[in-house]
Image (tube, rainbow, N blue to C red):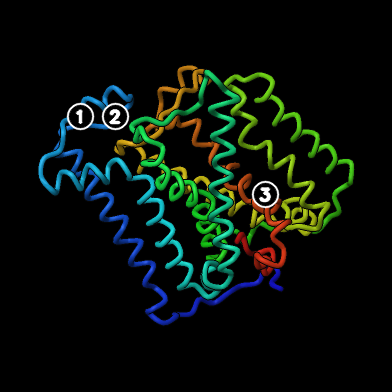
């Protein structure tokens, strides 16, 4: 077991271990090249409505058709490319790639990520009806035509955030985040749990986009005390041990992915747009499609997904490899 203060010395693995890094880099370059080729050939900017998508000129020639296909499927392809890139980076680090050392863990996380994102989509499109915080535009009309894209994109959400957070942990960026161990009172853990219930209940009862303020943190409060009580990896247990690095790494991974995803989303044709009127005039100050204030939601999102995954791992004991110690997110 490694303590939070344990340093590590990177070594240089065989070059063959880096093949996924180069595959990922090639996918990202190809995606960006074809995406902006479509922007140039169609003489368009970013689209913001389905009507604008329908008015696009039809592509002519093999290059234009390839560029249009990529622009329509950008999210699924580029997010998958990001996973390859991150896996290659982790493979070159001393602690190795979680996808190779714990393959069952990684692939079950990839599957769980689809479910996790569907939970948030369900809350947004069913609980918030008709006031959706975000909506998808430009997606293919037939469900069968877009299912594969859903699977690839949704499956990449949680692994990407945790892999980036793991890179930060491996680099030692959060080794400073330590404090003296202390026992948290049981009353505090109970209070955290009931706070989570209230935070999750608000979107269900109010059905107003303003409840996004609690949606993206509610499951941290609700599920982490349960994970703690069941002896699972948990933020509360890390706090008791005086180790804050893992929580900070998960938050940093979420925010980093937020910056990447919003950038890749902006010029894509199948994309998401936001409607957050409760932000007032600040809604109009944006990082691509996302209001600047909304970027803060990516910080707890990475942590929330990690907590959800620890809960989902419970019935998978014996199939999914456990985390080696508290320096690992996946």
Of 198 and 153, nearer the camera is 153
Could you say where residue 264 lies in the image, as x and y percent from the top left? 35, 43
Question: x%, y% of residue 235?
Answer: 72, 51
Q: Which residue is mark 1?
A: 56
- Asked if disc 3 and disc 1 are in contact, CB closer than 8 Å, the reply is no
Residue 76 percent location from the top left of the image: 38, 48
- The residue at the far bottom in this view is 14
- Quarter of the C terminus within the rendering: bottom right
The quadrant of the image that shows the N terminus is: bottom right
Of the pair 231 and 263, the residue shown nearer to us: 231
User: Rounded to the nearest whole Å, what is the CA distance between mark 2 and mark 1?
Assistant: 10 Å
Name the one closer to the observer, 77 or 46.
77
Look at the numbered discs 2 and 1 and tell me whether their residues touch, using CB distance below 8 Å. Answer: yes
- Distance from label 3 to label 2 (Cα)? 35 Å
Q: Dot 2 lies on which element?
A: loop
Mark toward the start of the polypeptide (3 vs 1):
1
Q: Residue at x 53, y 47 (%)?
A: 114
Residue position marked by numbered label 2 in the rendering: 47
Residue at horizontal 76 percent and vertical 33 percent from the top: 197
Spot occupied by residue 49 in the image (x, y as percentages of width and height): 33, 24
Asked whether the viewer can see residue 179, the reply is no
* SS for callout 1: loop
| The label number, if any, that marks residue 307 in the structure image | 3
């Amino acid at each position: 077991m490694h303590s939070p203060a344990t340093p590590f010395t990177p070594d240089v693995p065989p070059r063959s271990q880096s093949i996924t890094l180069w595959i990922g880099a090639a996918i990202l370059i190809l995606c960006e090249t074809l995406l902006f080729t479509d922007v140039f050939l169609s003489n368009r900017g970013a689209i913001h409505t389905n009507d604008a998508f329908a008015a696009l000129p039809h592509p002519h020639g093999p290059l234009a058709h390839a560029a249009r296909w990529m622009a329509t499927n950008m999210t699924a392809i580029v997010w998958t490319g990001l996973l390859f890139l991150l896996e290659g980076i982790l493979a070159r680090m001393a602690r190795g790639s979680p996808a190779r050392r714990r393959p069952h863990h990684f692939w079950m996380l990839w599957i769980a990520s689809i479910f996790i994102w569907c939970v948030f989509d369900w809350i947004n499109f069913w609980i918030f009806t008709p006031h959706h915080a975000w909506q998808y535009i430009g997606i293919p009309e037939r469900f069968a035509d877009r299912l594969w894209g859903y699977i690839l994109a949704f499956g990449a959400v949680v692994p990407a955030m945790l892999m980036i957070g793991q890179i930060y942990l491996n680099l030692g960026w959060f080794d400073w985040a330590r404090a003296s161990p202390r026992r948290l009172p049981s009353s505090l853990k109970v209070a955290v749990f009931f706070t989570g219930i209230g935070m999750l209940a608000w979107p269900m009862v109010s059905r107003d986009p303003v409840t996004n303020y609690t949606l993206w943190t509610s499951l941290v409060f609700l599920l982490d005390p349960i994970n703690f009580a069941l002896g699972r990896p948990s933020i509360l247990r890390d706090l008791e041990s005086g180790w804050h690095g893992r929580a900070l790494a998960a938050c940093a991974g979420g925010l980093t992915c937020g910056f990447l995803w919003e950038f890749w989303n902006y010029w894509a044709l199948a994309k998401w747009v936001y409607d957050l009127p409760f932000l007032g005039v600040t809604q109009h100050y944006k990082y691509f499609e996302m209001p600047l204030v909304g970027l803060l939601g990516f910080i707890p999102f990475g942590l929330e997904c990690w907590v959800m995954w620890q809960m989902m791992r419970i019935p998978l004991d014996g199939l999914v490899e456990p985390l080696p110690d508290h320096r690992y997110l996946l």
